[in-house]
């Protein structure tokens, strides 16, 4: 196994792609630890300690949601926008023509998807700010806080989308899938370590 990996690194182009992919994933993990200002971390931790759907969604965000980092929305706005435009392509003739018109048409749909990502991220960001205020975990609730959080979360989603596209173009594999996988692994490993520790103790 190790010999095969060493052989892969002897191929210059492949080596560059692997290193580039790892660098993008490191940036993703670093960003998931940068918190959005104005949140009471202890109160937020109490909310997520209840488990349920929030914990499930947090797994796909790589823990960024429970920490309420700048990447709290994860890559989901982009995925949702992609699904929406795939469905619209089958029912709107103009989009269907674009999809069948070659690379230029697909690039236009990709651009529409990016705009859709911004819209969905902003809507989700607004929903999260209202929810956080209702849970009492915000230090200074109000319109300025909401605008700050919406802009921050939207920018975070766009950053992840950009990182995913960069990995797809210059790295290895599908960038979006790798970001999702890295997020899940980042949550599963600590949980496994915690479970093993509990088994040893108990």
Image: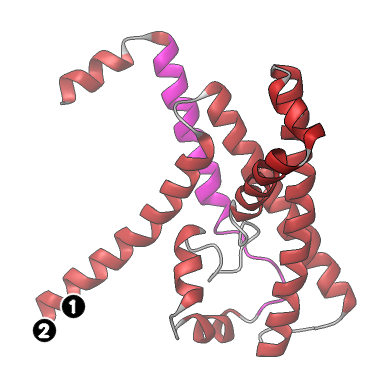
Residue 16 vertical position relative to residue 63 in the rendered view, above or below: above
Give the magenta part as a residue range. 13-39
> In the depicted view, which residue is nearer to us: 117 or 197?
117
Residue 44 vertical position relative to residue 27 in the rendered view, above or below: below
Q: Main secondary structure of the magenta part?
A: helix
Quarter of image, res 172 = top left
Position in image of residue 128 (x %, y %)? 69, 73
Q: Residue at x 66, y 54 (%)?
A: 77
Q: Is residue 196 left or right of residue 117?
A: left
Residues tagged 2 and 1 counted as in contact (Cβ below 8 A)? yes
- Name the element at disc 1: helix
* Neighbour tally class for label 2: few under 14, some 14-19, many 20 plus, Cα within 10 Å: few
> In the depicted view, which residue is nearer to us: 91 or 22?
91
Position in image of residue 27 (x %, y %)? 55, 43
> In the depicted view, which residue is nearer to us: 95 or 156?
95
Residue extending farthest right: 143
Q: Is residue 146 left or right of residue 47?
A: right
Q: In this figure, which colouring scheme has been used for the structure?
A: secondary structure
- Is 30 magenta? The answer is yes
* Neighbour tally class for label 1: few under 14, some 14-19, many 20 plus, Cα within 10 Å: few
Count of numbered labels shown in the rendering = 2
Residue 193 vertical position relative to residue 47 in the rendered view, above or below: above
In three-dimensional space, the C-alpha distance between marks 2 and 1, rounded to whole angstroms, equals: 6 Å
Tell me the residue that label 1 is attached to: 198
Q: Residue at x 48, y 58 (%)?
A: 60
Using the rendered image of the protein, determine whether residue 107 is visible from the camera's viewpoint: no
Tell me the residue that label 2 is attached to: 202
């Amino acid at each position: 196994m190790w010999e095969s990996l060493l052989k892969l690194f002897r191929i210059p182009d492949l080596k560059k792609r692997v290193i580039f992919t790892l660098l993008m994933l490191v940036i993703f993990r670093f960003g998931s630890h940068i918190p959005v200002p104005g949140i009471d971390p202890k109160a937020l931790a109490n909310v997520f300690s209840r488990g349920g759907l929030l914990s499930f969604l947090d797994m796909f965000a790589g823990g960024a949601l429970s920490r309420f980092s700048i990447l709290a929305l994860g890559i989901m706005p982009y995925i949702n926008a992609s699904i929406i435009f795939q469905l619209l392509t089958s029912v709107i003739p103009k989009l269907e023509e674009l999809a069948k018109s070659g690379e230029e048409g697909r690039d236009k749909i990709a651009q529409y998807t990016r705009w859709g990502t911004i819209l969905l991220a902003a809507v989700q960001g607004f929903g999260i700010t209202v929810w956080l205020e209702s849970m009492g975990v915000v230090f200074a609730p109000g319109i300025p806080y909401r605008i700050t959080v919406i802009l921050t979360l939207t920018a975070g989603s766009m950053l992840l989308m950009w990182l995913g596209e960069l990995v797809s173009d210059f790295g290895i594999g599908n960038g979006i899938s790798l970001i999702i996988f890295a997020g899940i692994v980042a949550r599963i490993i600590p949980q496994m370590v915690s479970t093993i520790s509990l088994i040893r103790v108990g």
